[in-house]
Structure formats: structure tokens, C-alpha cells
Image: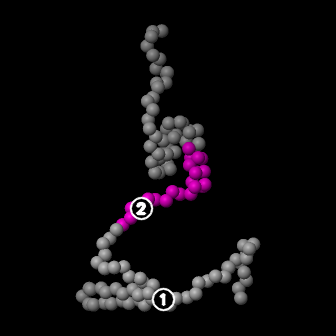
Amino acid sequence: MSGAPDDHEPQAAEAEPFDAGDDLADRVRHARQRHGLAGGILASAMLGIDQAVNGRKPREEAPIVVDANSDPTDIDTDGISVELDDHERVAFVAPPLPRRAPITTRLTTRRGRRRPSR
């Protein structure tokens, strides 16, 4: 036996930073590649528990800002009016809905059963 390293000895791998990504399948695949079958099973179980407890993470959406040529109107008091120019002049007007009193009665009893219809 010479002083040469044995081919069957595992080489020390450099530590790679973990990039979680957004896809759950990519996370499980990465854990299975790094830690074997047990790592993949454990990763999928923990991600499933996280999803069950915390729910899906809301997606961050960028706010959209559009310049308007006039001040905003209150559609509750003014209604909606739209004019379309397409070969003919078309106008559409929707008057505001009348105000109603708020509904304040409870729809269910304290035990969670629905009240019978009257």
C-alpha cells in the first residue's frame, strides 16, 4: 500500500450556500441530492407541515401607478359614466345605488346552527 489516497474514501466537499428557491419540488430535490432519500422525505414532511400551519405565502406584487387626467370621483355618490369613441358615439351611465341600512342581525346562533327561515 502506498501513500496515495484510496479511491473509496469520501472527499470533503466545499460548503455550498443553500438557495431555497420558490418551488417546493426544487427544495425537496435539493435536499434529496444533498442528504439522500431520508433528507428528501424529511424535507417534504417539514415543508408540508409549514404549508399546513402557515398557509401559502402571499406573492409580493408591485404596486401599479397610473397618471390620471382628472381628480378621482366618488362612484358611491356620482355613479359611473363612460364615453367610447368607435365609429359611433356611445355613452354609458350607471347611477349610484341608493343607500341601505346596514344588516346588524346575527345569522347564526351561539352554538353555530343556522336560524330557521321565517
Q: Which residue is mark 2?
A: 61
| Outermost residue toward the left in this view | 87
Local crowd size for mark 2, using a 10 Å CA cut-off: few (<14), some (14–19), many (≥20): few
Foreground pick, 51 / 34: 51
- Residue 6 screen position, x and y as percent: 47, 17
The amino acid type, in three-letter code, at marker 1 is Leu
Q: Within the magenta stretch, is there residue 63?
A: yes
User: Tag 1, which secondary structure?
Assistant: loop
Q: Residue at x 43, y 90 (%)?
A: 95
Question: Which corner quadrant of the image does residue 83 belong to?
Answer: bottom left
Give the left or right position of residue 35, taking residue 84 as reference.
right
Number of marks drawn: 2
Which amino acid, mark 2? Glu
Q: Position of residue 53 (x, y in %)?
A: 60, 54
Residue situated in front as seen by the camera: 110 or 25: 110
Mark 2 and mark 1: Cα distance apart in space: 32 Å
The vertical placement of 100 against 7, above or below, is below
Q: Magenta stretch: give its range.
A: 43-64
Residue 55 lies in the magenta-colored region: yes
- Residue 98 vs 15, above or below: the answer is below
Q: Looking at the image, tell me whether mark 2 or mark 1 is earlier in sequence order.
A: 2
